[in-house]
Amino acid sequence: MIISDDPEAIRRVLIGSKTIAVVGCSPKADRDSHQIAQFLIEKGYDVVPVNPAAPEILGRKCFPDVKSIGRKVDIVDVFRAPEHIPPIAEDAVAAKVECLWLQSGIIHEEAAKKTAAAGLYVVQDRCIRTLHMMLVRK
């Protein structure tokens, strides 16, 4: 189900999630992906950085892709250009995550529809940090 415009559904996903894979997480502290991963850690989430070019980010082991994580992930939060979304979405479906989250400015309608049809929640073009601050307040 695509829930980009459903604040209550997004709130439930955020509250019910424990582990978030941040795809495209940067080791550079000035990048949004790094700052948002840090925010999610501070809010108590188990953040798993996904970046094939870095061994570790924010003191956590990095993985080259979602399928390599090897444990349950609730949200796959993506900081990659739209052309990279289809294989990430396929990995999210295969890993049986609850939600594929495409950050602000990232939209891929075809991948979103396929992912939603596979039973995952999908959020497109929304900042997880902004919505967390608005909807969860913890």
Image: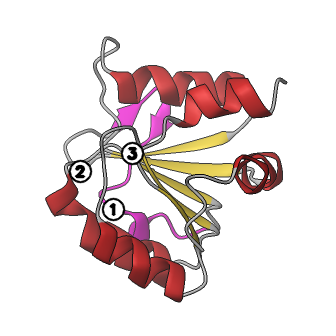
**Mark 1, residue position:** 65
Q: Residues within 10 Å of mark 3 (few under 14, many from 20)?
A: many
Residue at 75% x, 53% y: name it: 17
- The image shows residue 57 at horizontal and vertical percentages of 40, 30
> Where is residue 70 drawn, in percent x and y?
53, 70
The image shows residue 25, relative to residue 15, as above or below, that is: above
Query: Which residue shows up at 38% across the image and 35% down it?
Result: 56
Q: Does the magenta run of residues contain 66?
A: yes
Tell me the kind of residue under disc 2.
Pro
Which numbered disc flags the more N-terminal residue, 2 or 1?
A: 2
Three-letter residue code for mark 3: Cys
- Measured in 3D between alpha carbons, the distance from the residue under mark 3 to the one under mark 2, in whole angstroms, is 7 Å
> Which stretch did the figure color magenta?
56-71
* Closest to the observer, 109 or 52: 109
Q: Secondary structure at mark 2?
A: loop
Q: Position of residue 36 (x, y in %)?
A: 49, 26
Viewer-side residue, 78 vs 104: 104
Image marks 3 and 2: residues in contact by CB distance under 8 Å: yes
* Circle 2 residue: 52
